Image: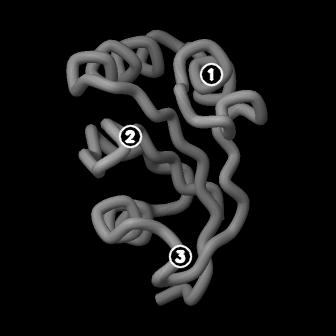
Amino acid sequence: MADRIGAMHILVDHEYEVEDLLKKLENGDSFEQLARDFSKCPSGKQGGKLGEFGKGMMVQEFEKAAFDLEVGQVSGPVKTQFGYHLIKRTS
């Protein structure tokens, strides 16, 4: 298992927003553009890019979901104290 992974994410307030974003992805919208348009995290301006991180650097729910993904895979809704995340593993 990797010690460090790369990921991008989109942060929104409600689970239904994540469901809408997943539909947009299925219809061919780019993850980066959706992050720019909808994410309430400052990383949205960079297309949701978080760079690389190791264990213990993110909140537990986010970390577990991100590390469980395959490279290129997108998560379902992940709830943390910040809201709902859609996570895409990049490395």
Q: CA distance from mark 3 to mark 2?
A: 16 Å
> Which of the 4 image quarters holds residue 85?
top left
Whole-percent x, y for residue 4 in the image: 61, 81
Q: Is residue 55 above or below residue 9?
A: below
Quarter of the image with the C terminus is: bottom right
Q: Position of residue 11 (x, y in %)?
A: 46, 34
Disc 1 secondary structure class: loop
Q: Nearer the viewer, mark 1 or mark 2?
A: 2
Q: Which residue is the site of mark 2?
A: 85
- Residue 38 - label: none
Of discs 3 and 2, which sits in the foreground? 3
The residue wearing badge 1 is 30
Q: Earlier in the sequence, mark 1 or mark 2?
A: 1
Of residue 15 and residue 2, the one placed in the foreground of this image is 15
Between 43 and 27, which is closer to the camera in this rendering?
Answer: 43
Furthest residue toward right: 46
Residue displayed at 22% across by 18% down? 16
Residue found at the very far front of the displayed protein: 81
Q: Which amino acid is tagged 2?
A: His
Residue to which mark 3 is pinned: 57
Q: Residue at x 54, y 86 (%)?
A: 2
Between disc 1 and disc 3, whose residue precedes? 1
Q: Amino acid at mark 1?
A: Ser
Q: Amino acid at mark 3?
A: Met
